[in-house]
Amino acid sequence: MTTLAITAAPSGRTKRVLPGFGLTMGLTLTYVGIVILLPVIALMLKGAEIGPARFWEIITAPRAMAALRLTVTAAVIATIFNALYGLLMAWVLVRYRFPGRRILDAMMDIPFALPTAVAGLSLTALFSANGWYGQLLEPAGIKVVYTIWGVAIAMCFTSIPFVVRTVQPILEDLDPQLEEAARSLGATPFTIFRKVVFPQILPAFLIGTTIAFARSLGEFGAVIFIAGNLPMKTEIASLLAVIRLEEYDYNGAAAIALTLMLIALILLALSNGLQWQMNRRRGQP
Amino acid sequence: MTLSLSHITRRFGKTEVLRGIDLEIDKGELIALLGPSGSGKTSLLRIIAGLDWPDAGTLAFDGQDWLSRSAAERKIGLVFQHYALFPHMKVRDNIAFGLNVLPRAERPGKGAVAETVDRLLSFLQIAPLGDRYPAELSGGQRQRVALGRAMAIQPRVLLLDEPFGALDAQVRRDLRRWLRGVHDSAGITTIFVTHDQEEAFELADRVVVMNEGRIEQTGRPDQIYDHPATPFVARFLGLNVELPVTLNAGRIEAHGLDLSALPRRAMPDGPATLFLRPADILPLPDPNAPFRLTEIASTGALLRIVAEDGTGCRIEAEVPRRAGTRLETGMNVLLRAEAGQVFPGSAQGRATAPAAASDITHALKENRP
Ligand SMILES: Nc1ncnc2c1ncn2[C@@H]1O[C@H](COP(=O)(O)OP(=O)(O)OP(=O)(O)O)[C@@H](O)[C@H]1O
Ligand SMILES: [Mg+2]
């Protein structure tokens, strides 16, 4: 909004780094429109075209319900794990100095950089009955590949950076004097974390966790290798959408995709709203 | 005796930040730690607060060793230079923090906490601000909240690091008076850090002058002002005219200067350095004197004059304008010192000291052609 207000100022009075507000803003909006907004709108229109009754029928069909339930449950498991582990990871990376810290820091980006199919393949290899981890887990009666746990692990892998990378900068910018002040006022380390540190990283943590969850919901490449994709058992929602598409059942595909998108969008909106509210209370714009 | 520090040293890597600090602070005293930037004031305060530990030395409170105690156990009220208020808590919750984190058994009830907070809010004259967030306060108000938060735990010692550093001159003066009032009515032993000598002298019972990790001098403000103990303190307090003199049977002598007003010193004969305030130098017209007035500039109430003796000795002085109406450039003058401080050893090859920080603007003005 503030950027829009700039147009009110007579052009040419202030020199800007990028040429032409109109040009840059136009390009940005066009891009957002074509790449982000349009597909979303198209999907919504498609969904509207289906009609609520038919829509409901599609997604409550047993196979779709099973796929959605699996996807959401696995995403919840992955997100809980990522929220805790990501917070810990960010903490370690920011608060401690140890040999290899920079390497560890760089490694956090691997899930972003690695093709998800590669991740899926290697995870499957590791956890399959004769893989490094599978060898150990299988005798203990824990089966990962072709179960919901495999799905959750693949989701974990691809979405962990979202939590780490949103919390990390906030943690880095925290004023160490706040913790010292709390310490001199008699707070124990745990109380300091709970009452001073955590409330300040909470907005970022919330956003990071939500994005991680949204990403897990839609994760495809990494999951389909390890999931086994048995209908009604380990078939994720995105895969079911692909299958429907291959059957030329556009409505079926669109309804499932739209459901996933709505869950993600609602959560994003909620967490953004919460963040906005928290920041507003603190007088930060 | 309340707080006792002895031989405290602290090193960060190779830099020695504190080099043997000895200090005794009495109950209820208001102490100023005064020193230039980097002299180790904050480092010392952090050690007293229990946020840092010395490499050597002892720290005791009423005879109890404090180095073996955590910050929490010491019960110290600490006010940071930039306040360090918790941004996500209302003023009220900031002040109550120290009470709310007490172990359950010692924690006062909700009502008692609220009562304490209300009392502090009105004591600090910020009663209407209790429900605001720190971001919605002015600097001076934040300062008060920070002090309230520190006082809520009924600290045994209150430590303030440059409490007014980030405020403008007018607010500083107001808060200074207010802090003195707070101290007098609460009676808490207080140490505050500053690099503003006016602030230190106006506010403190006792001033501790620090330089490069050492205490240069400790004393009452008047004492330090009248009798700076070291050349550093002398320069820091504005005695920035440095002259080579000779001590002869306790008398201070220098060519072209009338030093008869200065008392005799029990110091060995030989070269010495005399430190004078520009305002304590009186030029008396005398055709036979070696100094000639080369510059006269008015600053309103004062005349700033420069006298040179032709051998490279250049002295700056200040006279009230009314007293200096007879002075003209080119005139020969005898310089009479009304007060000054002498230290053995020769001035390091210069007749006039470089202007002290506070005088640097004047010096720049004067040197303009
Ligand atoms: N954690 C640290 N690591 C290394 N050096 C430090 C550290 N803390 C302080 N120092 C050094 O110690 C010296 C004294 O610092 P200190 O903060 O005590 O000075 P100060 O008197 O408070 O100065 P100022 O008036 O600028 O606040 C400085 O030279 C500083 O660079
Ligand atoms: Mg300091």
Image (cartoon, coloured by chain):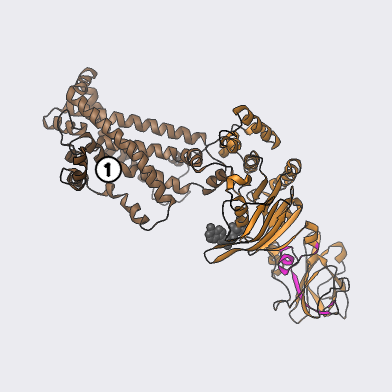
Chain colours: A brown, B orange
Residue A75 seen anywhere in this rendered image of the structure:
yes
Question: Disc 1 sits on a residue from what chain?
Answer: A
Residue A25 seen anywhere in this rendered image of the structure:
no
Q: Residue at x 51, y 48 (%)?
A: A176
Image coordinates of residue B190 in percent, x first then y, are 70, 48
Q: Is residue B244 magenta?
A: yes
Report the amino acid beneath label 1: Thr
Image coordinates of residue B16 in percent, x first then y, are 58, 65
Q: Is residue A201 magenta?
A: no
Image coordinates of residue A131 in percent, x first then y, are 17, 47
Q: Residue at x 56, y 36 (%)?
A: B103
Whether ligand 1 has any atom under 8 Å from the Cβ at mark 1 is answered as: no
Q: Is residue B145 above or below residue B218?
A: above
Q: Which residue is mark 1?
A: A158
In the displayed structure, does residue B13 sit left or right of residue A109?
right
In the displayed structure, does residue B274 sit left or right of residue A96?
right
Q: Which residues are magenta?
A: B226-253
